[in-house]
Structure formats: C-alpha cells, structure tokens
Image (cartoon, rainbow, N blue to C red):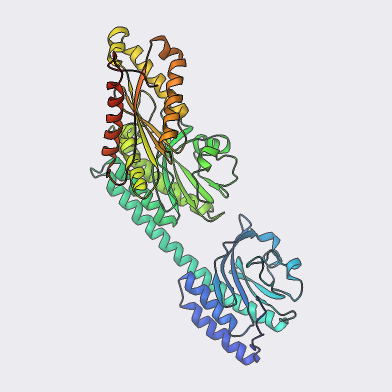
Amino acid sequence: MPSPPPREVRSTVAERYRVLLETGRTLAGTLSTEELYAAIYRETTSVLEAAGFSIALYDQGRDLARIVYYVDQGEVREPDVVYRGSDSEVLRTRRACVVNRDLTRDCVMVLGEEDSEVAQSAVAAPLIHKGRLLGAISAQSYRPDAYNEDDLALLQGIADIAAVAIDNALQFEELQKRRREAEKIEEIGRALTSELDPKEVLDKVIDAVLDVLDVDAAGVWLCDGPEETVVTVAASGGAQALPEGLKWRLEGSLEEQMIRERKPVVIDNLENAPAVPEAVRRHIRTRSGIGAPLEVSGRVVGVLTAASVRPRAFNDDDAAVLQRLASQASVALENARLHANLQALSLTDPLTGLPNRRRLQIHLDKEVAAARRGRKLVTVVFDLDDFKKYNDTHGHVVGDDILRAFAQILDDENRAMNLVARYGGDEFVSVLSETHMEGARQYVERVSQRVKEDPILSQYGVTVSSGLAEFDRTSMKSMEELLQAADLDMYASKSQRPGSRRAATN
C-alpha cells in the first residue's frame, strides 16, 4: 500500500507537557484494558506521528512478550503475535530506543500483511512500574528518520504514565477474575450438597473453567478403568470442545507431572507437542492448553483441562487457577463416588471396556444433530447369534470371554472419530460419522472376518448378525428412529436366511 503523507504532529515543550498531564487524567480513569489500549494510542498519536502503533505485554518468568494491541494506518488489527522478550532491545535493556532506518534488520519482527509496505522508522519505550517491566509501546512511521531524541523522551513519558494505568487495569482484571473464580467455586460447592446428577456437576465445572479462564475449550477426562494413564473425555464444552469419549494415553512428561507428581501442566504449542498423540491431535482445534489432575481418595482419577486458540496463552498463574478449580471438582467427584456414580461418570461398560448405553445416547444425540445439518451418519447394530446357548452350555465365564473378545474386535476396527458401544446384553452399536453406506459395509465385512479368525470366537463357533441404517433428514428426527432402522435391517437380513434363525453376517 502507498505510504501516507506525514502528519504534522510536532509540538512545543509546553504542548507536550500539557499532553502528558491530559494523558495521565485520561488513563487514570480507565480500568478496561481494551479501552485503555485504545486511549494510549489516541494520546500518543496526538503528539507523535504513528502510522503504526503497538503495545506488548511481557511475562518475564517465561521470557515471552505478546502483542496485545496493534494499529496500522488507523485500523486496529489482531496479530496474535508472541516473541521472546530477550530478543527485543527495549525489553532486554529496559531503555527506550529509536530506529530510523532498516527496521527489517533491527526490529524483532515485522507486523502486517506479507505484501504490504514496511515501516521505515520506529520509536519504542519500555513500560515499567515500581521496577517491574510490564512490556513496551512502539510507534512506527513509513518515513525514514521520522523520530528524534525529543520524540523518544516524549514516548517514554507517555509509557511511564501508561505503565501505571496498565498495571492498575491488569490488577483490576485479576480481581474480577478472582471474584468470578470464587463465585464459580461456591456454585460448584452448592452443587455438591444438592441432588444433582453427576453429569450436571461436571457441566458446572466445565462452565467454571470457561468463564474464569476465558478459554475456547474445557474438558474433564476420567481415567479409563484402573489404568490411571488412559483417560477419556467424560464432559467437554466451549467453542472448540473435544468430542466426548475421546481417549488419551498420558505418557512421558505428562504422566510424570500430572499422574505421578500430581502437578498442573502447561503446553505452549499443542500442534507439535510430542506428548500429544496423533489420535488426539487430529481433533484439536486449539493452539495451547493446561491440565490439572483430579484426585479422589488419594488417587488420580482424571484430568481437568483448558485450551485456547492462541499459542502460549497460559502461564503459571492460569495453571494455579485451574488447579484450584480441579481441587473443587475433585470434591464433586468424591461426592459422586460416595453415591456410587463414579462408574456411571466414566460412561464405560465394566465388562467389555466399551462405552456403555448412556455414553452411546449422549454421543448419538450430538451426531444426529450434526446429521440434521448435512453430516453423513451410519449406525451398525451387531447381535451375537444365539448367545444364550453359550451361557447355558459353557457357563457365564465363557459367555463373558466371548463378549470381551467381540468387544475387542470392534474397538480395534474403530476409528478415533467414531464410537462403538455395548448397547445391552449381546448387542453392540457402532456409530460411523462422515461415512457412507458402502464404507459401513466394508467395516462390517472386516469385523465379520475378524470374528472368523479370532481364537476364542472361532473355538465356540460364534457368529454375528448386523443391521445398517443411514440417517435420513427427510424421514428421521431422533436417534431412536436411526437405531430402530438398523434393528429392522438386521432382522430383515436374518429373515432372508432359510434354515437359520440367526445367521452370520456376510
């Protein structure tokens, strides 16, 4: 874009002194950070040329600076840029500086579009209050040699006033955050003494995390059976919520810190973190996250998580807040355990390890809602043929072995985005999202082949029947209708097989 003509903003010493006084009065009464950043920009541009303007906040403990406010040609942008503070001369030396030529060489980064013109000069000053380095402000010009030492002194004066206002605003925001946290913890506490369904308690925990930390996703992961390192999403919420039922085996540093040491974890970049398995990564739409362990009766039973679409969005203070919420959530889980509901919260069938009927209903409700909007959805109902005879002939121990063996086949053949569940007795259901009928038939064929090859199932001559149904937006309205259609297809298939009341799937 062409360079704008320079704006005449040079002023006398008296005028600049007046501006500093006016800036102090304006900023002192502004507690909203969003309004405050805009006010700092307005006051700065009243005395300094600033085709570009930015404010960065600095986390000294992590050496990370984040651009929180950026204006180019009078238009507010949202660059969401994070950089190492030690790479910035202003933050490293805590002194203001002027760069009048070759910004691409002397500056930490260049903001704006790839093909846009680069500013030719800049002036920047640190934000310091009571000896604490809060960040930096910078003004840029498309003209070379746009700034002099007087401009540098003026911007530093503005920065000194702005630092006080920013510190006050951040403290006010922190107080507001703590107030919301206290209210949410109190709300969770009230839920503990009520007769709420355990799922409702978890939903309140999710709401608390979303509200207090202002994040894009929150989740409660519960340990899958006695193995602490395998966790499953039992409840989730937020614009980027993960699907319930998703599993994650915690390994390496995550297992060590959260399960063994029972400490919260901050992950700056979820996209390339080695601790995040690919099966989980493909469902993640956020950039950074934190997790805190949930403890019941001295044992880790799960993890409370929060995630943001911004990279490096969390610090140790955020992790401490999540840990406090996790402690309260742990009390909720303990209360549920005492009422014999913890097993139901895991939504897992204790015999087969598959999701149970309740988990299936929760999942299907969401999938049917998505199917109404056009997403493809197929369900498959499986039935073990004449299963009762195995219990009667060989005993219930063998019957349980058969159920577990078939469940393992379904779990092995299942994709991460799909769900297989024990519907009840000897019936199982597979929910195939984004799948057409031909793909579902191929899936059934793979399962049938595995049944023939399985050492336990083949030993007892076990066969399986199945029925398929695809969600039809014109004729179906609920998950019950979808399951009923799959059931009808299964029994229609059985009726076409002469000489056998229950025949194996082809």
- Foreground pick, 386 / 226: 386
Q: State the image coordinates of residue 312 (x, y, percent, origin top left).
A: 56, 54
Q: Quadrant of residue 88?
A: bottom right
Q: How many numbered circles does the render carry?
A: 0
Classify residue 496 as left or right of residue 103. left
Q: State the image coordinates of residue 60 (x, y, percent, origin top left).
A: 61, 59
Q: State the image coordinates of residue 167 (x, y, percent, origin top left).
A: 52, 68
**In this rendering, does residue 299 appear at all?**
no
Classify residue 166 as left or right of residue 364. right
Quadrant location of the C terminus in the rendered image:
top left
Residue furthest top as drawn: 393
- Foreground pick, 223 / 454: 454
Q: Quadrant of residue 382?
A: top left
Depicted 244 relative to depicted 1: above or below: above
Q: State the image coordinates of residue 102 (x, y, percent, origin top left).
A: 76, 71
Depicted 337 relative to depicted 393: above or below: below
Quadrant location of the N terminus in the rendered image:
bottom right
Q: Residue at x 66, y 70 (%)?
A: 116
Depicted 419 relative to depicted 476: above or below: above
Q: Residue at x 38, y 60 (%)?
A: 179
Q: Residue at x 44, y 45 (%)?
A: 242
- Foreground pick, 187 / 79: 79
**In this rendering, does residue 462 appear at all?**
yes
- Foreground pick, 113 / 128: 113
